[in-house]
Amino acid sequence: MSRGRLALATGNRGKIREIEEALAGLDMEILTRDDFRDWPPLEETGKTFEENALAKALELARWSGMPALADDSGLEVEALGGAPGVDSAVYAGTHGDDASNLARLLREMQGVPPSRRRARFVCVIALASPAGERMLVRETCEGAVAETPRGEGGFGYDPVFVPEGMDRTMAELSLREKNAVSHRGKALRRLRVMLDSGEPAWLFAAPRREGWGE
C-alpha cells in the first residue's frame, strides 16, 4: 500500500489530537490547517451531522486536491428535546466558545432530576476525495449530563458528560481512556480498520496539490 495523504478539516486542537492519536502508525501523512498557506471557508449549514461533515470534507478535498477527513459532532440531551444537537458548537451564539456553551447548557439543566439527564454524544466522520467520492461513519456515546463541570482534559461539553457505566466525566479521563469510549474514538476505530485494509482505495492514490505547505 503506497503512502497516502489526508487533510483534516478542523482547526480544533482537541479534535486534531484525538484523530492523530487514533490514526497513529498508519502509513499516511496527516495534514492540518498549519500545513497550508491559506484555508477555504468550511461552513456548517446542514440540518444533520451527516450533512455538515460531508460538506466540509468535500469542500476541503476539492480545494486541496487530496482526500479530506471532516467530522461533525455534538451533544443531544433528552430533557432538551435533543438540543443542542447540530448547534452544539454555537449553542451560546459564538462558534467554539466552549465556556459559554457549557454555561448555557447548565442553566437550562438546572433542576432537572437525574432520571431525565440522559444524553448522548454523536459523531459523524466523512471522508471525501477531490473527485467527489465519499464515505460516512456514525457512532454515539451514551451517558448523562452532570450537575457541575469536573476535570481539566478534553474540550467542549466533556466536563459535564459522564459516559454510561462510569462515574467520571469525559474531562477526567486520559486521552486514551476517552478514545476508548467516546463517539469520536469509536468512529475513528471503525475508520482505521478500513484504512488498515487499504480501503477506500482512492484515499491512497491522490495527487499532490501544487501550492500547499512550503
Image (cartoon, rainbow, N blue to C red):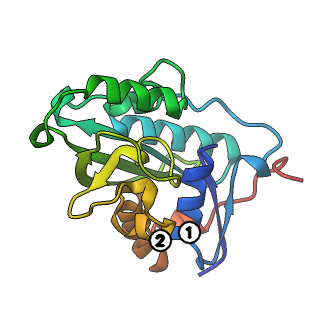
Counting the numbered discs, the total is: 2
Q: Look at mark 2 in the image and give the residue it sits on.
A: 176
Give the mark nearer the N terminus: 1 vs 2: 1
Q: Secondary structure at mark 2?
A: helix
Which is nearer the eye, 55 or 84? 84
The answer to whether 160 appears left or right of 116 in the picture is right
Give the CA distance from mark 1 to mark 2: 8 Å
Do callouts 1 and 2 mark residues in contact (Cβ within 8 Å)?
yes
Q: Position of residue 206 (x, y in %)?
A: 64, 61
**What residue is at 58 percent from the left and 32 percent from the top?**
42
Q: Position of residue 106 (x, y in %)?
A: 33, 30
Image position of 69 with respect to 89: above or below: below
**Nearer mark to the viewer, of 1 and 2:** 2
Image quarter of the N terminus: bottom right
Query: Outermost residue toward the right?
Result: 214
For the question of whether residue 118 can be seen, the reply is yes
Q: Look at mark 1 in the image and give the residue it sits on.
A: 21
**What residue is at 35 percent from the left and 64 percent from the top?**
186
The answer to whether 205 appears left or right of 110 in the picture is right
Q: Amino acid at mark 2?
A: Arg
Q: Amino acid at mark 1?
A: Glu
Label 1 Cα neighbours within 10 Å, binned few <14 / some 14-19 / many ≥20: some
The answer to whether 193 appears left or right of 68 in the picture is left
Image position of 147 with respect to 135: above or below: above
**What residue is at 33 percent from the left and 65 percent from the top?**
181
The answer to whether 13 appears left or right of 201 in the picture is right
Label 2 Cα neighbours within 10 Å, binned few <14 / some 14-19 / many ≥20: few
Q: Position of residue 110 (x, y in %)?
A: 25, 27
Which is nearer the eye, 62 or 34? 34
Q: Position of residue 203 (x, y in %)?
A: 55, 64
Q: Choose top left, top right, bottom left or bottom right for residue 97.
A: top right
Q: Secondary structure at mark 1?
A: helix
